[in-house]
Amino acid sequence: MGKAVSKSNKKSHKAASKQNVLLLGLSRSGKSTLVARLLSEKISEYNPTEGFNLVNYSREDDTGSCLNLWDLGGSKLDRIGWQFFYPVTDGIMYIIDSEDRYHLEENKRQLNLILNNNILQKVPLVIVANKQDIEGAIDETEIKSLLELNNASNMLCGIFGTSQSIESSIASCLHTLVNEMETKHIR
């Protein structure tokens, strides 16, 4: 049902503080591929995650922060189980397939459930508008409008356009989330 992988990129000898980051989104949004890019692994075709994958990721900067990246399955059945991870999460990355207009309403519904969940009110969230390199992809501004996030709660820290081929955009998104997590430090 779940797999765990450890990858250390740490150059610092500081004691690492573990923080839990949930990677949420519908099936085939690119969550597992995004994790592979962060780990600088070779990208291959992934099947949708069933259950979850856990990856221990140490950042390459001098912060010494170590993240547990919880790549949770995005099928309808898997989404029922997301709530069981909420009490121990420090941050959320919600990944959207920017090319998939058909599932925008379902993404909107899932985001509203997250944004209105009392357990998550102080947990920072970033939205990753993935697959921006594909022609016809919806940009960050339009996603914010279509998902009606203009008046979103203070959980929302930003919407980032990424593509699996641009590692720096993924790292920038994670950097923003970690900074917000350290500012809000809820646990």
Image (cartoon, rainbow, N blue to C red):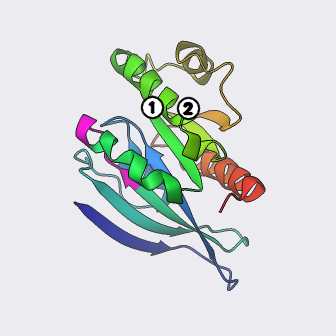
Counting from the top left corner in percent of width and height, residue 35 is at: 44, 54
- As helix, strand or loop, the secondary structure at mark 2 comes to loop
Say which of 25 and 63 sits in front.
25
Mark 2 and mark 1 lie on one chain; the one further toward the N terminus is: 1
Q: Which residues are magenta?
A: 71-77
Say which of 84 and 103 sits in front.
84
Q: Amino acid at mark 1?
A: Ile
**In this view of the protein, can residue 95 be seen by the observer?**
yes
Residue plotted at (65% across, 63% down): 187
* Separation of residues labelled 2 and 1 (CA atoms): 19 Å
Which one is in front in this view, the residue at disc 2 or the one at disc 1?
A: 2
Residue plotted at (26% across, 38% down): 75
Outermost residue on the bottom side: it is 13
Q: Is residue 94 left or right of residue 36?
A: right
Q: Disc 2 designates what residue?
A: 116
Counting from the top left corner in percent of width and height, residue 40 is at: 46, 61
Counting from the top left corner in percent of width and height, residue 63 is at: 72, 70
10 Å crowding of disc 2: few (<14), some (14-19), many (20+) = few
Image quarter of residue 14: bottom right
Q: Is residue 20 left or right of residue 131?
A: right
Counting from the top left corner in percent of width and height, residue 1 is at: 22, 60
**In this view of the protein, can residue 166 be seen by the observer?**
no
Image quarter of residue 154: top right
Say which of 18 and 65 sits in front.
18
10 Å crowding of disc 1: few (<14), some (14-19), many (20+) = many
Residue plotted at (51% across, 27% down): 112
Q: Amino acid at mark 2?
A: Asn
- As helix, strand or loop, the secondary structure at mark 1 comes to strand
Q: In the displayed structure, would residue 9 be above or below residue 96?
A: below
Q: In the displayed structure, would residue 38 be above or below residue 65?
A: above
Residue 75 in magenta stretch: yes
Q: Disc 1 designates what residue?
A: 96
